[in-house]
Image (cartoon, helix red, strand yellow):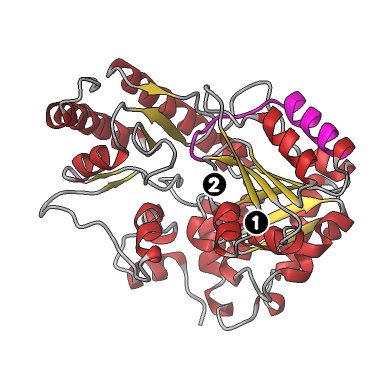
Amino acid sequence: MPVSRRGFLRLVGMDAGPLSGAVLSARGLEAHLAEAQAQGQRARPVLPPGVDEIRISSNENPLGPGRAALDAILGKFPEAGRYPFNSTPADADLVAAIAAKYKVKPENVVMGAGSQEILKSAMRAFVSESKSLVTALPTFENCTGYAKRYKLPITEVKVDSQMRLDVEPMIAAAIKDKAGLVFFNNPNNPTATVHGAKTVADMVERIRKGSPDTVILIDEAYHDYVTDPSYETAIPLALSTPNVFVARTFSKAYGMAGMRIGYAIGMADTVKPLAKLKMPYNVSVFGTAAAIASLNDPQHIDDERKRNTEVRAFTVQALQDMGTKPADSQGNFVFVDIGRPAKDFRDACAKSGVMVGRDFPPFEKTHCRISIGTMDEMKKAVEVFRTALKTNTTSTGDGKGRA
């Protein structure tokens, strides 16, 4: 029997107003699952009694999916028993919609269960005992973790003094090692910094010239949040250059982290190995419907970019006023030099219900990653930050604390 929006909201005990993003976007687990997974268990933070939680630890869209996506999800409940290829729209329709957006053929697009599946497939396809991974430090750990887990060769290049990917030594390592894969996260997570289009194009050209078999993966998970005018997506570059592809996700600006929809886009021969490795039925009926609806709702992304830019500016200014040093942020998070261990700051914030990012070596003794929540959340959070920084100053007694 079809389920209406109003009927569904009644089922979950909510009124007929906008569906809370917290229901669908699986916010706040990243920091705690990282440690828990290492111990083979799940974990969530334990808050003091009566303390409300502000989850700004996992770079999620605090508002969740747009109205068009929510309507599409609710409309798919009658087909929850169907496989993705046998529903309407089918997973092939999502591939077609992405291909149409970029004016390419479906064979230029490979879907993933979030962009993490794309990254893991890239590691399986292009990195081996004789073909190394070249990546940054710190950066999104998916590829790094895979290489270390399976004892594959890896070169990690520390970010530069501005917390940007250090391009020159990455190029040199790729050419010297005849690397299998270069992972280039732009904007970079956790530092939130970005390189402009000219720098990226030059990097690709030089690696292609010095090591033409090396594959270059440019991860643009935070593309929609960039405001730096020098930046451009690398998708046109990938579509015209062999052995280059871009990874994208619906987890961030689209607010669909809990639905796990990502994709790779590039020349057909470049992404074909990823297609061979992808899981069968790797995107859900609900995620497919929501993603197609989101692609047809550009206003949602425009509104989210505007909201994030405003709240990000407020947060950065507040952090600077406290004497901390945020790196230039082009994402929906900030990497900030707080002058003390992230764990101490994180624990102090958690006592007031504010959850900030996990450790990011080699900067875990000085820096913390703070995701951007709503304006109301960040106004409350910065007051907690101010208190936590003062508390840490008193407790550490190292003379490096900032009020």
Q: Quadrant of residue 92?
A: bottom right
Left-right relation of 223 to 92:
left
Q: Where is residue 30 in the image (x, y as percent from the top left)?
A: 41, 54
Q: Where is residue 261 in the image (x, y as percent from the top left)?
A: 60, 59
Label 1 neighbourhood size at 10 Å, few (<14), some (14-19), many (20+)?
many
The residue singled out by tag 1 in the image is: 119
Taking the spot 60% from the left edge, 65% from the top edge, the residue there is: 150
Q: Is the magenta stretch mostly helix, strand or loop?
A: helix
What's the residue type where badge 1 is placed?
Leu
Cβ–Cβ below 8 Å for labels 2 and 1? yes
Left-right relation of 227 to 312:
right
The range drawn in magenta is 189-208
Circle count:
2
Query: Where's the C terminus, which quadrant?
Result: top left
At numbered mark 2, what does the secondary structure look like: helix, strand or loop? Answer: loop
At numbered mark 1, what does the secondary structure look like: helix, strand or loop? Answer: helix
Q: Where is residue 171 in the image (x, y as percent from the top left)?
A: 74, 34
Find the distance from the CA under tag 2 to the CA under tag 1.
10 Å
Taking the spot 19% from the left edge, 32% from the top edge, the residue there is: 388
The residue singled out by tag 2 in the image is: 140
> Is residue 70 visible to us here?
yes
